[in-house]
Image (cartoon, rainbow, N blue to C red):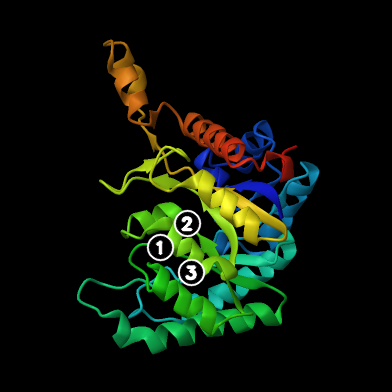
Amino acid sequence: MATFYLSAFADEAGGGIKEQIDALKSHGMTHLEPRGLDEGNISLYTVEQAKELKKILDENEIKISAIGSHYGKIKITENFEEHYENFKNCVEVAKILGTKRIRMFSFYFSENEKYEDYKDKVFKRVEKMCDYALENGIYCCHENEKGIYGDNAERCYELLSTFKGKLKGVFDPANFIQCGVDILPAFELLKDYIDYLHIKDCVYSDGSIRPAGLGDGKIPELLKRFDEVKNGDTFLTLEPHLKVFDGLKDLEEEGGTADKLKDDFTYKTNRDAFDAAATALKNCLEKAKIVENTVIR
Protein backbone atom coordinates (compact mmCIF):
# COMPACT_ATOMS: atom_id res chain seq x y z
CA MET A 1 0.00 0.00 0.00
CA ALA A 2 1.22 3.47 -0.90
CA THR A 3 1.20 6.73 0.99
CA PHE A 4 0.15 9.38 -1.51
CA TYR A 5 1.26 12.99 -1.41
CA LEU A 6 -0.52 15.51 -3.60
CA SER A 7 1.54 17.70 -5.90
CA ALA A 8 0.67 19.89 -8.86
CA PHE A 9 1.86 21.92 -11.80
CA ALA A 10 0.53 24.97 -10.00
CA ASP A 11 1.65 27.37 -12.72
CA GLU A 12 -1.71 26.47 -14.24
CA ALA A 13 -3.32 28.29 -11.28
CA GLY A 14 -1.10 31.36 -11.51
CA GLY A 15 2.26 32.40 -12.89
CA GLY A 16 3.86 33.67 -9.69
CA ILE A 17 5.09 31.46 -6.87
CA LYS A 18 2.86 33.19 -4.31
CA GLU A 19 -0.23 32.47 -6.40
CA GLN A 20 0.91 28.89 -6.87
CA ILE A 21 1.49 28.34 -3.17
CA ASP A 22 -1.94 29.78 -2.38
CA ALA A 23 -3.56 27.36 -4.83
CA LEU A 24 -1.70 24.38 -3.35
CA LYS A 25 -2.56 25.29 0.22
CA SER A 26 -6.23 25.85 -0.58
CA HIS A 27 -6.48 22.18 -1.57
CA GLY A 28 -4.27 20.74 1.14
CA MET A 29 -1.44 19.91 -1.26
CA THR A 30 2.01 19.53 0.26
CA HIS A 31 4.20 19.53 -2.86
CA LEU A 32 4.86 21.43 -6.07
CA GLU A 33 6.23 20.22 -9.39
CA PRO A 34 7.66 23.54 -10.60
CA ARG A 35 7.56 24.48 -14.26
CA GLY A 36 6.68 28.10 -15.03
CA LEU A 37 7.79 30.51 -12.29
CA ASP A 38 8.43 34.20 -11.66
CA GLU A 39 11.86 34.06 -13.29
CA GLY A 40 10.81 31.84 -16.19
CA ASN A 41 10.88 28.09 -16.72
CA ILE A 42 12.42 26.03 -13.91
CA SER A 43 14.57 24.21 -16.49
CA LEU A 44 16.67 27.34 -16.93
CA TYR A 45 16.79 28.55 -13.33
CA THR A 46 20.20 29.46 -12.02
CA VAL A 47 21.57 28.13 -8.76
CA GLU A 48 20.99 31.52 -7.13
CA GLN A 49 17.40 31.67 -8.35
CA ALA A 50 16.86 28.17 -6.98
CA LYS A 51 18.15 29.23 -3.56
CA GLU A 52 15.72 32.14 -3.45
CA LEU A 53 12.86 29.86 -4.48
CA LYS A 54 13.81 27.37 -1.77
CA LYS A 55 13.56 30.08 0.90
CA ILE A 56 10.04 30.96 -0.17
CA LEU A 57 8.97 27.32 -0.28
CA ASP A 58 10.44 26.60 3.15
CA GLU A 59 8.66 29.60 4.64
CA ASN A 60 5.38 28.18 3.35
CA GLU A 61 6.13 24.53 4.18
CA ILE A 62 5.87 23.45 0.54
CA LYS A 63 8.21 20.78 -0.79
CA ILE A 64 9.21 19.84 -4.34
CA SER A 65 8.06 16.47 -5.66
CA ALA A 66 10.03 16.67 -8.94
CA ILE A 67 11.47 19.24 -11.29
CA GLY A 68 8.99 19.69 -14.14
CA SER A 69 11.77 20.13 -16.67
CA HIS A 70 11.62 20.28 -20.46
CA TYR A 71 14.73 18.13 -20.99
CA GLY A 72 14.33 15.65 -23.80
CA LYS A 73 11.76 17.96 -25.41
CA ILE A 74 13.84 18.75 -28.47
CA LYS A 75 13.84 17.01 -31.85
CA ILE A 76 16.04 13.94 -32.08
CA THR A 77 17.83 15.63 -35.02
CA GLU A 78 18.68 18.77 -33.00
CA ASN A 79 22.04 19.35 -31.39
CA PHE A 80 22.15 17.75 -27.96
CA GLU A 81 25.25 19.24 -26.34
CA GLU A 82 23.88 22.61 -25.24
CA HIS A 83 20.69 20.88 -24.09
CA TYR A 84 22.78 18.47 -22.03
CA GLU A 85 24.88 21.24 -20.46
CA ASN A 86 21.70 23.01 -19.35
CA PHE A 87 20.41 19.71 -18.00
CA LYS A 88 23.50 19.42 -15.79
CA ASN A 89 22.64 22.79 -14.26
CA CYS A 90 19.09 21.56 -13.68
CA VAL A 91 20.54 18.69 -11.63
CA GLU A 92 22.15 21.28 -9.36
CA VAL A 93 18.81 23.08 -9.07
CA ALA A 94 17.12 19.82 -8.09
CA LYS A 95 19.66 19.28 -5.33
CA ILE A 96 19.10 22.77 -3.96
CA LEU A 97 15.33 22.35 -4.02
CA GLY A 98 15.55 19.05 -2.16
CA THR A 99 14.08 16.68 -4.72
CA LYS A 100 15.54 13.49 -6.15
CA ARG A 101 13.50 13.62 -9.36
CA ILE A 102 13.70 15.42 -12.69
CA ARG A 103 10.83 14.83 -15.12
CA MET A 104 12.18 14.38 -18.67
CA PHE A 105 11.30 13.10 -22.16
CA SER A 106 12.70 10.98 -24.97
CA PHE A 107 12.90 13.45 -27.88
CA TYR A 108 10.47 14.52 -30.58
CA PHE A 109 10.19 13.02 -34.04
CA SER A 110 8.91 14.54 -37.26
CA GLU A 111 6.25 12.71 -39.26
CA ASN A 112 8.72 11.42 -41.84
CA GLU A 113 11.21 10.11 -39.25
CA LYS A 114 11.08 6.49 -38.16
CA TYR A 115 11.54 5.65 -34.50
CA GLU A 116 13.68 2.60 -35.23
CA ASP A 117 16.13 4.67 -37.28
CA TYR A 118 16.95 6.81 -34.26
CA LYS A 119 16.52 4.32 -31.42
CA ASP A 120 20.25 4.10 -30.66
CA LYS A 121 20.57 7.88 -30.53
CA VAL A 122 17.56 8.17 -28.21
CA PHE A 123 18.93 5.54 -25.86
CA LYS A 124 22.42 7.08 -25.76
CA ARG A 125 21.02 10.50 -24.94
CA VAL A 126 18.65 9.20 -22.28
CA GLU A 127 21.38 7.11 -20.68
CA LYS A 128 23.78 10.06 -20.65
CA MET A 129 21.26 12.17 -18.74
CA CYS A 130 20.38 9.32 -16.40
CA ASP A 131 24.02 8.57 -15.59
CA TYR A 132 24.90 12.18 -14.84
CA ALA A 133 21.80 12.67 -12.68
CA LEU A 134 22.37 9.45 -10.74
CA GLU A 135 25.98 10.39 -10.03
CA ASN A 136 24.48 13.36 -8.21
CA GLY A 137 21.79 11.44 -6.35
CA ILE A 138 18.99 12.40 -8.74
CA TYR A 139 16.71 10.17 -10.83
CA CYS A 140 15.47 10.99 -14.31
CA CYS A 141 11.74 10.28 -14.54
CA HIS A 142 10.48 9.68 -18.07
CA GLU A 143 7.03 10.96 -18.99
CA ASN A 144 5.13 9.52 -21.92
CA GLU A 145 4.31 12.33 -24.37
CA LYS A 146 2.73 12.48 -27.81
CA GLY A 147 5.32 12.67 -30.58
CA ILE A 148 8.36 11.46 -28.62
CA TYR A 149 10.04 8.05 -28.74
CA GLY A 150 8.23 6.99 -25.57
CA ASP A 151 4.75 7.90 -26.73
CA ASN A 152 3.25 4.41 -26.42
CA ALA A 153 3.44 1.74 -23.74
CA GLU A 154 5.74 -0.60 -25.66
CA ARG A 155 8.46 1.99 -26.29
CA CYS A 156 8.16 3.27 -22.73
CA TYR A 157 8.73 -0.30 -21.60
CA GLU A 158 11.83 -0.55 -23.82
CA LEU A 159 13.31 2.53 -22.18
CA LEU A 160 12.34 1.74 -18.61
CA SER A 161 13.38 -1.91 -18.71
CA THR A 162 16.66 -1.16 -20.49
CA PHE A 163 17.59 1.48 -17.92
CA LYS A 164 16.08 -0.22 -14.89
CA GLY A 165 17.61 1.27 -11.77
CA LYS A 166 18.59 4.43 -13.67
CA LEU A 167 15.31 5.64 -15.14
CA LYS A 168 11.92 5.88 -13.46
CA GLY A 169 8.53 6.22 -15.14
CA VAL A 170 5.91 8.94 -14.94
CA PHE A 171 2.54 7.64 -16.11
CA ASP A 172 0.38 10.28 -17.81
CA PRO A 173 -2.98 8.75 -18.84
CA ALA A 174 -4.13 11.73 -20.92
CA ASN A 175 -0.98 11.70 -23.03
CA PHE A 176 -1.45 7.98 -23.67
CA ILE A 177 -5.07 8.50 -24.69
CA GLN A 178 -3.99 11.14 -27.21
CA CYS A 179 -1.79 8.44 -28.75
CA GLY A 180 -4.62 5.90 -28.85
CA VAL A 181 -3.17 3.77 -26.02
CA ASP A 182 -5.48 1.64 -23.87
CA ILE A 183 -4.85 2.84 -20.31
CA LEU A 184 -5.18 -0.21 -18.07
CA PRO A 185 -3.15 -2.61 -20.26
CA ALA A 186 -0.48 0.11 -20.48
CA PHE A 187 -0.43 0.38 -16.70
CA GLU A 188 -0.10 -3.40 -16.31
CA LEU A 189 2.85 -3.44 -18.69
CA LEU A 190 4.64 -0.54 -16.98
CA LYS A 191 3.55 -0.88 -13.35
CA ASP A 192 6.89 -2.18 -12.06
CA TYR A 193 8.63 0.95 -13.34
CA ILE A 194 6.15 3.71 -12.49
CA ASP A 195 7.40 6.14 -9.87
CA TYR A 196 4.45 8.52 -9.81
CA LEU A 197 1.29 9.47 -11.69
CA HIS A 198 0.20 12.60 -13.49
CA ILE A 199 -3.47 13.24 -12.87
CA LYS A 200 -4.84 14.41 -16.19
CA ASP A 201 -7.83 12.94 -18.04
CA CYS A 202 -8.77 12.95 -21.71
CA VAL A 203 -11.23 11.52 -24.24
CA TYR A 204 -10.33 9.33 -27.21
CA SER A 205 -12.86 10.95 -29.53
CA ASP A 206 -11.06 14.25 -30.01
CA GLY A 207 -8.13 14.24 -27.56
CA SER A 208 -9.61 17.01 -25.42
CA ILE A 209 -8.73 17.25 -21.73
CA ARG A 210 -11.28 16.67 -18.97
CA PRO A 211 -11.19 16.90 -15.18
CA ALA A 212 -10.03 13.62 -13.64
CA GLY A 213 -12.70 10.93 -13.75
CA LEU A 214 -14.69 12.62 -16.53
CA GLY A 215 -12.68 11.28 -19.46
CA ASP A 216 -11.54 7.88 -20.70
CA GLY A 217 -8.51 7.64 -18.40
CA LYS A 218 -10.18 5.35 -15.85
CA ILE A 219 -8.56 7.47 -13.15
CA PRO A 220 -10.21 5.88 -10.06
CA GLU A 221 -9.30 2.37 -11.24
CA LEU A 222 -5.80 3.55 -12.15
CA LEU A 223 -5.36 4.98 -8.65
CA LYS A 224 -6.63 1.78 -7.09
CA ARG A 225 -4.23 -0.38 -9.11
CA PHE A 226 -1.30 1.93 -8.40
CA ASP A 227 -2.03 1.67 -4.68
CA GLU A 228 -2.00 -2.12 -4.93
CA VAL A 229 1.48 -2.31 -6.47
CA LYS A 230 3.20 0.70 -4.90
CA ASN A 231 4.75 0.57 -1.44
CA GLY A 232 5.86 3.63 0.50
CA ASP A 233 5.68 7.31 -0.36
CA THR A 234 4.72 8.43 -3.84
CA PHE A 235 3.12 11.38 -5.62
CA LEU A 236 -0.05 12.15 -7.49
CA THR A 237 0.78 15.24 -9.52
CA LEU A 238 -2.16 17.25 -10.79
CA GLU A 239 -1.75 18.68 -14.29
CA PRO A 240 -5.09 20.34 -15.13
CA HIS A 241 -4.58 21.46 -18.77
CA LEU A 242 -8.20 22.62 -18.77
CA LYS A 243 -9.42 25.39 -21.04
CA VAL A 244 -9.61 29.00 -19.87
CA PHE A 245 -11.65 31.47 -21.87
CA ASP A 246 -10.65 35.07 -21.15
CA GLY A 247 -13.68 36.52 -22.91
CA LEU A 248 -16.19 34.60 -20.82
CA LYS A 249 -17.20 37.60 -18.71
CA ASP A 250 -18.31 39.56 -21.80
CA LEU A 251 -20.22 36.61 -23.20
CA GLU A 252 -21.99 36.01 -19.89
CA GLU A 253 -23.70 39.36 -20.27
CA GLU A 254 -25.28 38.08 -23.49
CA GLY A 255 -27.02 35.29 -21.54
CA GLY A 256 -26.78 31.49 -21.76
CA THR A 257 -23.24 31.23 -23.08
CA ALA A 258 -21.62 30.75 -19.69
CA ASP A 259 -23.58 27.58 -18.98
CA LYS A 260 -22.65 26.15 -22.36
CA LEU A 261 -18.96 26.81 -21.82
CA LYS A 262 -19.11 25.40 -18.30
CA ASP A 263 -20.49 22.14 -19.67
CA ASP A 264 -17.60 22.13 -22.14
CA PHE A 265 -15.08 22.31 -19.27
CA THR A 266 -14.06 25.86 -20.07
CA TYR A 267 -13.38 28.12 -17.11
CA LYS A 268 -13.30 31.84 -16.39
CA THR A 269 -9.80 31.95 -14.97
CA ASN A 270 -6.72 29.79 -14.55
CA ARG A 271 -7.49 29.50 -10.86
CA ASP A 272 -11.04 28.33 -11.57
CA ALA A 273 -9.66 25.64 -13.87
CA PHE A 274 -7.12 24.55 -11.26
CA ASP A 275 -9.77 24.41 -8.54
CA ALA A 276 -12.05 22.30 -10.73
CA ALA A 277 -9.20 19.89 -11.48
CA ALA A 278 -8.25 19.62 -7.80
CA THR A 279 -11.85 18.92 -6.78
CA ALA A 280 -12.11 16.24 -9.47
CA LEU A 281 -8.92 14.59 -8.19
CA LYS A 282 -10.34 14.42 -4.67
CA ASN A 283 -13.52 12.85 -6.05
CA CYS A 284 -11.39 10.19 -7.74
CA LEU A 285 -9.54 9.51 -4.48
CA GLU A 286 -12.91 8.91 -2.84
CA LYS A 287 -14.04 6.55 -5.59
CA ALA A 288 -10.75 4.64 -5.43
CA LYS A 289 -11.10 4.44 -1.62
CA ILE A 290 -7.56 5.65 -1.00
CA VAL A 291 -8.31 8.88 0.85
CA GLU A 292 -7.15 7.38 4.13
CA ASN A 293 -3.65 6.81 2.79
CA THR A 294 -3.46 10.21 1.07
CA VAL A 295 -1.74 13.08 2.90
CA ILE A 296 -3.96 16.17 2.66
CA ARG A 297 -2.92 19.04 4.90
User: Which circle marks residue 145 in the picture?
Assistant: 1
Give the crowd class for mark 1: few <14, some 14-19, many >=20 residues within 10 Å: many
**Residue 70 visible from this viewpoint:** no
Q: How many marks?
A: 3
| Mark 3 → mark 1, Cα distance in angstroms | 17 Å
Residue 158: x percent and y percent?
A: 45, 79
Whichever of labels 2 and 1 marks the residue nearer the N terminus, that label is 1
Of mark 3 and mark 1, the one earlier in the sequence is 1
Query: Label 2 to label 1, Cα distance in Å?
Result: 8 Å
Q: Which residue matches tag 3? A: 189
Q: Which residue is mark 2?
A: 172
Q: Position of residue 34 (x, y in %)?
A: 59, 53
Residues under numbered marks 2 and 1 in contact, where contact means CB atoms less than 8 Å apart: yes
Please indicate whether residue 251 sits to the left or right of residue 292 in the image: left
> CB of mark 3 within 8 Å of CB of mark 1?
no
Residues under numbered marks 3 and 2 in contact, where contact means CB atoms less than 8 Å apart: no
Q: Earlier in the sequence, mark 3 or mark 2?
A: 2
Picture residue at 68% right of the left edge, 72% below the top: 138
Residue count near mark 3 (Cα–Cα under 10 Å), binned few <14, some 14–19, many ≥20: few
Secondary structure beneath label 1: loop
Report helix, strand or loop for mark 2: loop
Does 137 sit above or below residue 65? below
Looking at the image, is 98 positioned above or below residue 154? above
Q: Give the alpha-carbon distance from disc 3 to disc 2, as whole Å.
A: 14 Å
Q: Is residue 232 left or right of residue 226?
A: right
Amino acid type assigned to the residue bearing label 3 in the image = Leu
Residue 200: percent from the left, percent from the top? 47, 47
